[in-house]
Image (cartoon, rainbow, N blue to C red):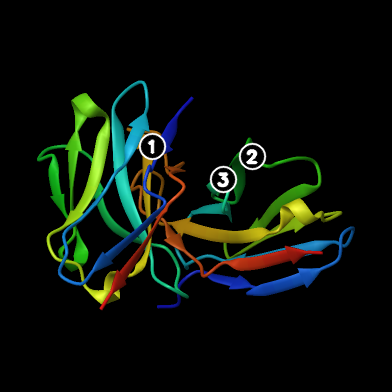
């Protein structure tokens, strides 16, 4: 069965620390990968996505993610977090050409302390 | 432009009562999704529609759940009778067309069944 795993459920960082959130997927074929973010009191919104090409993708607000096919991973990174990055982060995947039926991970709650 | 609009934002009801959640997708979007978010299971896709037609309802938990999309601008998710285990945040999302992978989420309806 298709699945997406996020192993870090809660992460607490100080401002300016570096961030890496893990995401692993289990799919039989080619996949498209996404990171969504949900800021407190707001709706989920797309942070970045990978379809093909350069495995290092850049998103909004200084976030980036690297697709490593051999590891079935799509980890999210940011060199220096800010207090405003406090949010819940969701990794998602779908088979290429599989419509918009996304499978989401369980999410990682990030808290950035001043 | 208005985003995806959901109502009610919060609903508290007693076990056995009928619950109806409503969603207005972004105008021009032809795919609509209902997700449920819980601490234990994360974000689960319940059902999605393309051009008002239900495509995949395999995520609907059981017969107590039903969803309709009578026209391109309105969808409902109904639970009858409701049970405490249905307590969750229910998200509606829409997408401009199948294939982009980007979903636009509403702010969610938080349901508490006592």
Chain where mark 3 sits: B
Q: CA distance from mark 3 to mark 1?
A: 18 Å
Q: Give how far across and how far down residue B23 sits, in percent.
A: 61, 66
Residue beneath disc 2: B57
Name the residue at 60% across, 51% down: B52
Q: Give how far across and how far down residue A108 sits, in percent.
A: 39, 54
* A77 shown above or below A103: below
Chain where mark 2 sits: B
Q: Is residue A95 visible?
A: yes
* A24 shown above or below A30: below
Compare residues A105 and B72 and report the one nearer the observer.
Answer: A105
Task: Mark 3 and mark 2 in contact? Answer it, CB < 8 Å.
Answer: no
Residue beneath disc 3: B41
Callout 2: SS: loop
Confirm whether circles 1 and 2 share one chain: no
**Relative to A83, A2 lies left or right:** right
Q: CA distance from mark 1 to mark 2?
A: 17 Å
Residue A85: image quadrant is bottom left
Give the mark toward the camera: 3 or 2. 3
């Amino acid at each position: 069965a298709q699945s997406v795993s996020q192993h870090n459920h809660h992460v607490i960082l100080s401002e300016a620390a570096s961030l890496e959130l893990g995401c692993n997927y289990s799919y039989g074929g080619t996949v498209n990968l996404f990171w969504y973010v949900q800021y407190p009191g707001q709706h989920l919104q797309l942070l970045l996505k990978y379809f093909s090409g350069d495995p290092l993708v850049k998103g909004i607000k200084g976030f980036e993610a690297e697709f490593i096919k051999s590891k079935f991973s799509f980890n999210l990174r940011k060199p220096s977090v800010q207090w405003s990055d406090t949010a819940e982060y969701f990794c998602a995947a779908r088979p290429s050409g599989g419509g918009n039926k996304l499978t989401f991970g369980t999410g990682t709650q990030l808290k950035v302390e001043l | 432009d208005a985003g995806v609009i959901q109502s009610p934002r919060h609903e508290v009801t007693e076990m056995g009562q009928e619950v109806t959640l409503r969603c207005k997708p972004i105008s021009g979007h032809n795919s609509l999704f209902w997700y449920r978010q819980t601490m234990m299971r994360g974000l689960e896709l319940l059902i999605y529609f393309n051009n008002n037609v239900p495509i995949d309802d395999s995520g609907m938990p059981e017969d107590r759940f039903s969803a309709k999309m009578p026209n391109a601008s309105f969808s409902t998710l109904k639970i009858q009778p409701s049970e405490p285990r249905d307590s969750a945040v229910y998200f509606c999302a829409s997408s401009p067309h199948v294939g982009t992978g980007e979903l636009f989420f509403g702010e969610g309806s938080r349901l508490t069944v006592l």
